[in-house]
Image (cartoon, rainbow, N blue to C red):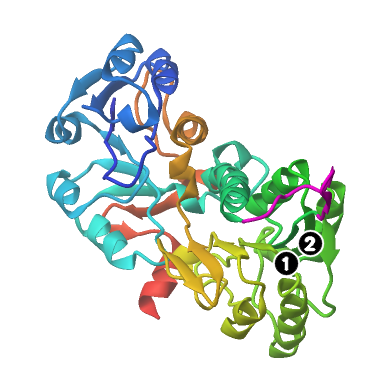
Amino acid sequence: MTIGILKENEGENRVAMLPESIATLVKMNVNMVVETGAGLRAYATDAEYVDAGAKIGSKAQVIADADLVLKIQPPTTEEMAMFKEGQSLMSVLNPYFNTSLVKQLAEKNITAFSMDIVPRTTRAQAMDILSSMATVAGYKAVLTAANTLPKFFPMFMTAAGTIKPANMLILGAGVAGLQSIATARKLGAVVYVFDVRAAVKEEVMGLGGKFVEVEGAIDDKSAGGYAVEQTDEFKARQAKAIHDQAVKSDVIICTAQIPGKKAPLLIRKETVEAMKPGSVIIDLAASTGGNCEVTVDNETVIHNGVKVIGNSQLPTDMPTDASRMFGKNMINFLKLIITKEGALNLNWEDDIVKGTAVAHNRQIVNERVKSIIQD
């Protein structure tokens, strides 16, 4: 079997695999072909890929030769036109929103796996690219805030007097939120954290954060650790609690998302207007609507003196380690579908393989995606 790796479009600095991951697949009896310059923005040269055992070719050559194509961002219109029937694709397809792309993949008889819907089970943790990239995003969000805020993060005792530490509010204590807490605490900020899931309180406090509690949250254990929709009564209490904490905050980092749905609106426009000028909001949920009402995806907005940075792609600003983590997640998934002889073998009885697939044999095979399309 031949696996191909495509170069990402401008604006995406990561690559699906670094040369070190290529070497692992070559040892698994897989042929590798990599598009020219695919790793340059992640500081990996074509020569390093060749040394690891890959061939280098044009985009058209890679797609023509590959049985399975690996990519981070969804394939472009140009790339889709080059795909042949019967090929396979592994990418981050965002299938709950990109339903037209999923339909196109099915119609073209592409077996497509979307790595952003890998089941969140213990066995699948090593393949969970959302967690890996959220780790990068949470870390980078705090550093971005520190570079943007016109104040220090830590408390300083100086000859000019005492400098108070920055107050930070983190919305959502998933992987990105927890990494944000850890990084902000290392930098000396006082960190408050809100999450509807009471189960994360211990983790938040263990990292040195202060948990903002709002009674009456629905904590659905069947949601696999994700946040779920809440009642209107709870949302009203939640809104007041968040507003009261937000107006005292120098930095807010928004990470709260619900898979397959628009991000919950947690920071209203009037809350932003009540914050201190110079404060910073980093909205990692920008691509699904944002947790802040004034967020604009991929833009920085200054509203009433508050800088609101809408960026769901912070991992691309740390392309080397982000690519390294992404590639290792991919390899762990590939081990489920590659035989010792290096052939593709799709075991549809495997819950991870089945749960990650969105299209196969001209059919949309993911039940949730099917239900969204039918609705």
Location of residue 29 in the rendering, given as x and y in whole percent from the top left corner: 36, 16
**What secondary structure do most residues of the magenta stretch adopt?**
loop
Name the residue located 14 percent from the left edge and 33 percent from the top edge.
Answer: 64
SS assignment at label 1: loop
Location of residue 61 in the rendering, given as x and y in whole percent from the top left corner: 13, 30
Q: Are marks 1 and 2 in contact (CB under 8 Å)?
A: yes
Location of residue 203 in the rendering, given as x and y in whole percent from the top left corner: 82, 51
Which image quadrant: the N terminus? top left
Image position of 174 (left or right of 362): right
Residue projecting furthest to the top? 51
SS assignment at label 2: strand
Image position of 347 (left or right of 29): right
Q: Is residue 161 magenta?
A: yes
Residue on which the image places disc 2: 192
**143 lies above or below 300:** above
**Measured Cα–Cα span from mark 1 to mark 2:** 9 Å
Name the residue located 36 percent from the left edge and 21 percent from the top edge.
Answer: 342
Q: Amino acid at mark 2?
A: Tyr
Residue on which the image places disc 1: 249
Which image quadrant: the C terminus? bottom left
The quadrant where residue 20 appears:
top left
Can residue 253 be seen at all in this image of the molecule?
A: yes
Q: Amino acid at mark 1?
A: Ser
Range of the magenta residues? 150-164
